[in-house]
Amino acid sequence: MRLQPAESNGPAEPEPVREGPEKSLKQFKQHSTSLPFGQPTSLASISGPTYVTAQTLIQQVAYTLSDRLWTYSPETFDLDVAVKDWFGAGANNVYGYPTSVESMQIRQGAASIALGYMFSKDFDLKKRYVPQSILASSSTLQYLRAALDQLSLLYSVASPFVAHIAAIDYAGASSQLVPDYCSALSLAEELGFGMVSSISTYEAQHMALFSTLLASIMPTIHIYDGVSVGRETTRVIDVLDQAGLHNIYKAVQHEVSVPGRKKANLDTKVLRLLNAFNGELGTEYRVFEYHGHATPDSVLVVFGTVESSLAAQVALSLERDGAKVGVLTVRVYRPFIEEEFLKILPESVSTIGVLGQVDDQQAVLDGSVRSNLYRDVVAAVTFSEAWATPPTIIDVKYPRETVWTPVSVAAAFQMLVKKPILQPEDGSTGSEGPLALQLLDPSSVQQYTFWDIDTSESVNAPIVLGQALATDSANNVTTKTGYDNLIQGGVFRSDIRKSKKTIEASYSIDAADVIYVGGESLLKTFDILTGLKAGGKIILKLPSVKDDDLEKKLPVVFRSALRAKSAKLYIFDPPAVEVIANDPAQEVYLTELAFLRVAMPALEKTGLQKLASVNGTIDTLEELAKVLDNALRLIEIPETWATEKLDGAPPSLLKDICSSSFVAYDKIEVEPPTYLKDWKTAAKGLVFKEAYGTKPALRPDVNVKTYTVHVQENRRLTPPSYDRNIFHIEFDLGNSGLTYEIGEALGIHAENDEVEVEEFIRFYKLDPLEIVEVPSRDNPQVLENRTVYQALMQNVDIFGRPPKRFYEALAEFADDPDERKELTTLGGPTKEGNQEFKRRAEVDTITYADVLLEFPSAHPRFHDIVRIVSPMKRREYSIASCQKVTPSSVALMVVVVGWVDPKGRDRFGQATRFLNKLRVGASVTVSVKPSVMKLPPKSTQPLIMAGLGTGLAPFRAFVQYRAWEKAQGKEIGSVLLYMGSRHQREEYCYGEEWEAYQDAGVITLLGRAFSRDQPQKIYIQDRMRQTMNDIIQAYLKEEGAFYLCGPTWPVPDVTNVLEDAIARDAKTVGKKVTPRTEIEKLKDQLRYVLEVY
């Protein structure tokens, strides 16, 4: 643990609480464990003393200095959550534009798009020396390898490239998240990449910056622990803002670009770069760093975030106790500069231990397997002439699953020396008792641990408390949370440390001042008290248990440990407070108060205000504080608990959670069962409606108002030979009573393909006329009767794509052991299962029906199919007509979604195929959905519309309405219509209509962007920029409204055009504005409206 004096500045105190009516209740929500205190952080706020996570700092550097960012973040890892937020908000990098953030799929061939961008003939050569970056986990490197291999060969003509890699993988054998360095070490060695490691959160920003600079010399990997340290919230004093990063980046580049220096070898270039970097920052970073005894006999060489940080602290602690040991940490692993390694390695060393990670325990036991780091150290020492007798080198291998603690690191040192370096805590000379190693001063650091199930009402309490404590600028607070989703349906552990000095402790708390336990069931699984210091306090949530019954509830091991530790036990009974009994959601506030009273009783009054600044209100907290004694009581621990004896062997309890996720387990709600019934049962329901609660409905499976309409026109808009089938379909409303407003969407309650349904019925040997009873989606207590055929046509999404939970559910029905095993793997969390599931979903586009065909031994009954297969959902399409103009019809503009799977089968989107096949006169069930696309209140307000492809649909309705208003003699504002597609000849949809409206004076400006009809690509934003003066006049001078409909990709570019228009207009009138702020105001006024997908 490293302690440094805290600066006087820091997060501000909470605003004073004013008297008066109670303010709206603050509801704390944790958005991601990769964000500081789980909260979104703006790019501009990252500066100076601030609370951050290493991942946030790394993302800040990547976003600030990169032209583009490609991110490969497995679901829930959230390696790119901050950069996506910044990109969405339009935050600029140091080059004056938002860094393009592209979240990519993790599959074979990943990173090819990045390679294609850098070497594209359209690449802007002005960006040749602007870094391109990747954010990814080490588990994705196998998919990036092919592209990175190509990049290394072409690097002399490539842009600087840096990959920020979080060392994370999921180890299927142990079902836990592990810090994986092996993958990155091997890749860097084989492809010739540079590699830099961050050793703590405090240097994560600096090392991310140094890695970006190193990328100007060689393609570089910056690696850091992504399991724990990367997600720990802590206070960093010297955080650089964007301008600071840019200044250091430019200054170092200038320093190392002195003429004549480029001819140096690679090692010299790296050392010069690091020296220049230190000169600008005032730091003393080295490629290798030594900590420990000045003349050690034994030195441990380590690489990795937790390994390096913890080993350095342990070495210094052992040195104070007289042990002649030291640690050499590796910061720049590639290139491995042997001369620097030998220079820093003490000459007195006789034994070198290399702490090297290998894949698994089998590799540890296999004598033929050597760690990557061991091979480099052996090569450096063997060919050195520094020793007459070279030191002995020991390969101290460890598997990726290893969770490092001070004691386990000390055990690694013990492998290098004969004399015991740790003594048991009880002072005995034997080796029976627990070993003692104190890295921190308990008088200067307070430590608190929370254990709870992840469905607890108080799940956010530890993070709220951490953030509340952090509002005191005199404190330095760290918080960290881990989830084990495989025990008791999901448990979590949160650690909070608080000190007047800066804290660096990369291990779980092992001597807590206070521990909170959310239920006695946790005591039967975990040895929680092993992490409590002697004389510490424990708060145990135990609702409605009297003191006389307490002994029966607590395990014997727990009771005896309490007495042995001289601990204080507080029983927490939330329902004893009437407010909590009536409203369990308020339990989180009571939990926070209980902790505050037990852990920091002297600070309770000011603590209430700090808590109210984060979660709840001061009035709520003060009222609960008055009745807290009803729910919190101190228990007198009987002396007899110390001498109680177990019946049988002591239980095997876990010392800590085994982190298997970064989020709580997403529980699957149990759906009500369905039952097959014969026609007689259904007939009774129809005859005796009141007795059976039968209600007739057009489509009983949907819970919105529906209408029956009929097709009156279905025509293709693109040529038959063209690969995109865009068609216009119009429905006769008849006497359905359907009405709709401008901009609304039409919900299509599509049906499955009749031929495919009949084939499935034959294959699955179903009776199409059998009656199935299905719970209503609107109310599960209400059951509806459908035939099997009707259910497959209209209810059950049997030809949709199955999620992982379907494979897991289907495994229960498999009779064949091999099929059951494969289904379980596909539905489970293993790396292999995830890879195969992704391939099936994204490449093979497997359907539910395909899976049932593939695994014949898994043959659930039809009522089980209804339960485990997702229901069909309606598909909504923007209405392309105005009812004022066509009162008896409604029109849609649709593109057929189709592809060919790897087996050569034609696949189609369910709803678009359904619509495309409809013939004139066919009946369809539809519904109407409101939309954000609404016309401005005044007909004189201009419309600026940008539509891509079928995104033109709502604008056809807008233009029709303005034409109708003009025909009524109303004055209408100008209409600017921008449209984008690939080719004018094939995709100029409704072209004649637009030109007719332009001739009639309805459309003022028609901006057509056909991207592939000329050598240079022209997009919709280009046409807008060409007509900037028209936009300024219509949008700003005449207070028009802007609409964009279509895919999401042009949003940043289109928004940039509008921001430029705002800036240009403001400059003309001598007004100072912030374009981004003005866009936000326009959003609030409904004058900047997006409907993108």
Image (cartoon, rainbow, N blue to C red):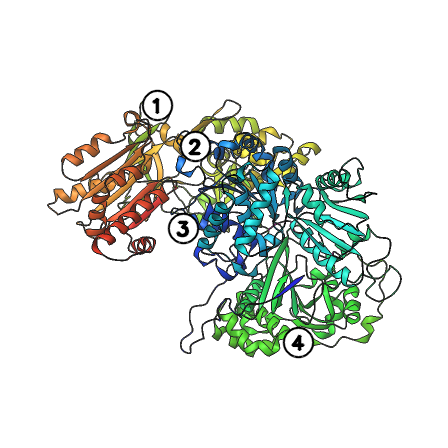
Instruction: Give the side of residue 933 with respect to residue 765, left or right.
Output: left
Q: Earlier in the sequence, mark 4 or mark 1?
A: 4
Three-letter amino acid code of the residue under disc 3: Ala
Q: Residues within 10 Å of mark 3 (few under 14, many from 20)?
A: many
Furthest-left residue in this view: 969
Q: Residues within 10 Å of mark 4 (few under 14, many from 20)?
A: some
Q: Give residue 101's position: percent from left, percent from top.
A: 45, 43
Q: Which residues are magenta?
A: 654-664
Three-letter amino acid code of the residue under disc 2: Gly
Instruction: Give the side of residue 900 with respect to residue 495, left or right.
Output: left
Q: Which mark is residue 909?
A: 2
Q: Nearer the viewer, residue 75 or 384?
A: 384
* Quadrant assignment for the N terminus: bottom right
Q: Nearer the viewer, residue 428 or 1046?
A: 428
Query: Tag 4, which secondary structure?
Result: strand
Residue position marked by numbered label 4 in the rendering: 633
Q: Give residue 93's position: percent from left, percent from top.
A: 42, 48
Residue position marked by numbered label 3 in the rendering: 91
Q: Nearer the viewer, mark 1 or mark 3?
A: 3
Q: Nearer the viewer, mark 2 or mark 3?
A: 3
Q: Is residue 533 above or below residue 950?
A: below
Furthest-front residue in this view: 260
Q: What is the quadrant of residue 526 in the picture?
A: bottom right
Would residue 809 be seen by someone viewing this image from the given angle?
no
Three-letter amino acid code of the residue under disc 4: Arg
Q: Nearer the viewer, residue 541 or 128?
A: 128
Three-letter amino acid code of the residue under disc 1: Tyr
Could you tell me how far apart the alpha carbons at marks 2 and 3 are, in whole angstroms?
36 Å
